Amino acid sequence: MSVQITGWYVVYTKPRHEKKVAGFLSALDIVNFLPTTRMLRVWKDRKKYIDSPLFPSYLFIYLEDLETYYKVLSLEAVLYYVRTGKEVVKVKEDVIHSIRLVTQQVSDMDIEVSDDYFQPGKQLMIKDGILCGLICEVVEIKGQQKILVRVNMLQKNILVAVSSEYLDSISA
């Protein structure tokens, strides 16, 4: 673990324990972020909308010191911190901000999580709507333009459909 510990990190939890771990962390006053999406679940006898984690078994945690690091690891349902080699992966603040913005503001549009690789897209600015002013990466998939939020440490991407009338080139 590096000396500069303050920042966002990702922990891997037991399957379907994300909400429980988030509750434990909140009770311990540890800042955490569990991005969720609303989806329709269909059973034989009923249908119900539920909030499902966007990244199953992953939870973002803001660490302030080494003591918090070990407190999080001591929780029963937390398995480990996400690493690259021997180094614990630190998540950039702008990635957390982008995920928060997309999951909180885009309730009526479809949010899609993909693990496909996408070529770098155009950097455009949204000129109208709830995400007005946001500079984002836009890719074209099957003839449709979508906002792309890359979450590299999880090898996942969040895609949100957006109409081309809302997009504008970035003025220099």
Image (spheres, rainbow, N blue to C red):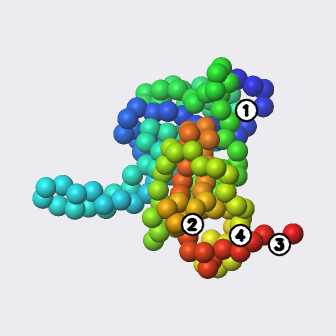
**Quadrant holding the N terminus:** top right
Farthest-out residue, front: 143
- Residue in the image at 75% along x and 25% along y: 2
Closer to the chain start, of discs 1 and 3, is 1
Closer to the chain start, of discs 4 and 1, is 1
Pointer 4 and pointer 1: residues touching (CB < 8 Å)?
Answer: no
* Mark number, residue 155: none
Viewer-nearest of discs 4 and 1: 4
Frontmost residue, 66 versus 100 = 100
Q: How many marks?
A: 4
Q: Mark 2 — residue?
A: 145
Residue 120 in the image, given as x and y percentages of width and height = 68, 52
Label 4, label 3: how many angstroms apart (C-alpha)?
9 Å
Viewer-nearest of discs 4 and 2: 2
Q: Mark 4 — residue?
A: 125
Is residue 155 among the parts visible in the rendering?
yes
Q: Mark 3 — residue?
A: 171
Left or right: 28 in relation to 92: left
Query: Helix, strand or loop at disc 1?
Result: loop
Residue 52 in the image, given as x and y percentages of width and height = 39, 52
Residue 167 in the image, given as x and y percentages of width and height = 66, 74
Q: Residues within 10 Å of mark 3 (few under 14, many from 20)?
A: few
